[in-house]
């Protein structure tokens, strides 16, 4: 039995915590909403995030970080990107006091605006500046709703340490979720983060009543943008984007109503404002944050990502979707295969 602290009591955090408890681990769930924590402890449900579903009853939830981390061998971060750095700083102080060095796992898919850092880079900076090997990222086509239903799922777990990737693979895998190890930590994270931007675009196309051809073109050219950013800026391996954290996650996020990024885009395509969508979504739309970081990188490093840049302009400069599509289709002809 492994003691695991799961930080983040949203849909994915709750489902992963329950899955890990089902696997026989001792799991405690940290969240900042006292009402949600009380519901989890008393009813073993989290109705705001996961309707008609029950968590493993052995899980306890708390809003106090120190007891959540006490004795933890693994700390799993499932927090929104904007919260990662501040929580990581608090985790660092608690670990300094305890003198322990648990393995850190991130299931958050985002890039921090301003710093343009991946989640593993933030955790490394704030907690383990000299020990990146103790950080593992998990990412792949894995909607919380489907994992909760024990749908067959495959996920990448990536680390610069093969031993740590294999350890997470062993602890997290079961008869309905299969983990594959990967040594391209940054590539797995880039794929997981930037596909959310492309999923917003896919939702917009659906909201504008475009069909399968447009969807296929968007996903294919979107994958090219993800790989271009990953390889040229983060030093990722091109083949990673042909895997679960690349094309796999892109497919599920661009085609499913379970994707909040897709649902966000759909409503924008139907004419709603970003402010309205974010206020009424009830959950974090990671792509809306990540697109800011991607835009900053495109501007600073002259990276060609026309779809991502168009989504940034629609969301934050209030440009017209139809005008952006016309501009995209009228761009100077280019070769298809390039980085």
Image (cartoon, grey):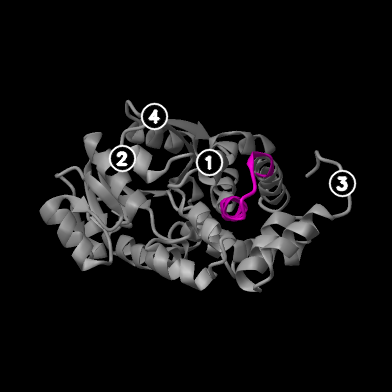
Disc 2 to disc 3, C-alpha distance? 43 Å
Measured from the top left, where is residue 104 in percent x and y? 40, 50
Q: Secondary structure at mark 4?
A: loop
How many angstroms separate mark 4 from mark 3 (CA)?
Answer: 39 Å
Quarter of the image containing the C terminus?
A: top right
Question: CA gap, disc 4 to disc 1?
Answer: 14 Å
Q: Which residue is mark 3?
A: 334
Residue drawn at x 59%, y 67% as measured from the top left: 115
78 sits to left or right of 71: right
Q: Quadrant of the N terminus?
A: top left
Tell me the CA gap for discs 2 and 4: 10 Å
Residue located 31% across and 55% down the image: 49
Mark 3 lies on a secondary structure that is: loop
Residue that sits furthest to the front in the current view:
209
Q: Is residue 91 left or right of residue 58?
A: right
Residue 184's label in the rendered image is: none
Element class at badge 2:
helix
Is 298 one of the magenta-colored residues?
no
The residue drawn where x is 19% and y is 42% is 56
Left or right: 97, with 233 as reference point = left
Q: What's the magenta region?
A: 197-214
Who is closer to the viewer here, 89 or 15? 15
On screen, 319 above or below 336? below
Do the residues under discs 4 and 1 have CB atoms within 8 angstroms?
no
Label 1 – label 3 distance at C-alpha: 26 Å
Crowdedness near tag 1: few (<14), some (14–19) or many (≥20) residues, C-alpha within 10 Å: many
Q: Label 4: which residue? A: 152
- Report which residue position mark 1 lands on: 249
User: Which residue is most to the top?
Assistant: 175
- Mark 2 Cα-neighbour bin, 10 Å: few <14, some 14–19, many ≥20: some
């Amino acid at each position: 039995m492994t003691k695991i602290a799961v930080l983040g009591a949203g849909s994915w955090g709750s489902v992963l915590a329950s899955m890990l408890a089902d696997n026989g681990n001792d799991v405690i769930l940290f969240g900042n909403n006292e009402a949600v924590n009380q519901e989890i402890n008393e009813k073993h449900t989290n109705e705001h995030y996961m309707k008609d579903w029950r968590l493993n009853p052995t899980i306890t939830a708390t809003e106090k970080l120190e007891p959540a981390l006490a004795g933890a061998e693994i700390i799993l971060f499932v927090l929104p990107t904007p919260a990662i750095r501040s929580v990581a700083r608090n985790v660092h102080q608690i670990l300094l006091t305890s003198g322990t060095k648990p393995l850190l796992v991130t299931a958050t898919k985002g890039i921090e605006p301003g710093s343009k850092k991946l989640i593993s880079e933030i955790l490394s900076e704030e907690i383990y500046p000299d020990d990146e090997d103790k950080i593992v990222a998990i990412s792949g086509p894995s909607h919380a709703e489907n994992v909760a239903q024990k749908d067959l799922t495959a996920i990448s777990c990536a680390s610069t340490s093969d031993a740590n990737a294999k350890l997470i693979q062993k602890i997290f895998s079961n008869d309905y979720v299969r983990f594959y190890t990967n040594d391209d930590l940054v590539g797995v994270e880039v794929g997981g983060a930037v596909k959310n931007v492309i999923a917003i675009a896919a939702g917009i196309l659906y909201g504008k009543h475009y069909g399968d051809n447009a969807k296929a073109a968007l996903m294919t050219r979107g994958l090219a943008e993800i790989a271009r950013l990953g390889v040229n800026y983060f030093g990722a391996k091109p083949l990673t984007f042909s895997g679960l954290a690349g094309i796999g996650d892109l497919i599920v996020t661009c085609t499913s109503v379970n994707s909040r990024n897709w649902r966000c885009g759909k409503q924008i395509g139907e004419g709603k404002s970003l402010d309205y969508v974010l206020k009424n979504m009830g959950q974090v739309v990671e792509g809306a944050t990540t697109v800011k970081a991607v835009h900053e990188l495109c501007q600073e490093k002259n990276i060609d990502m026309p779809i991502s840049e168009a989504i940034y302009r629609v969301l934050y400069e209030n440009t017209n979707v139809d005008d952006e599509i016309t501009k995209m289709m009228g761009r100077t002809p280019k070769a298809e295969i390039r980085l």
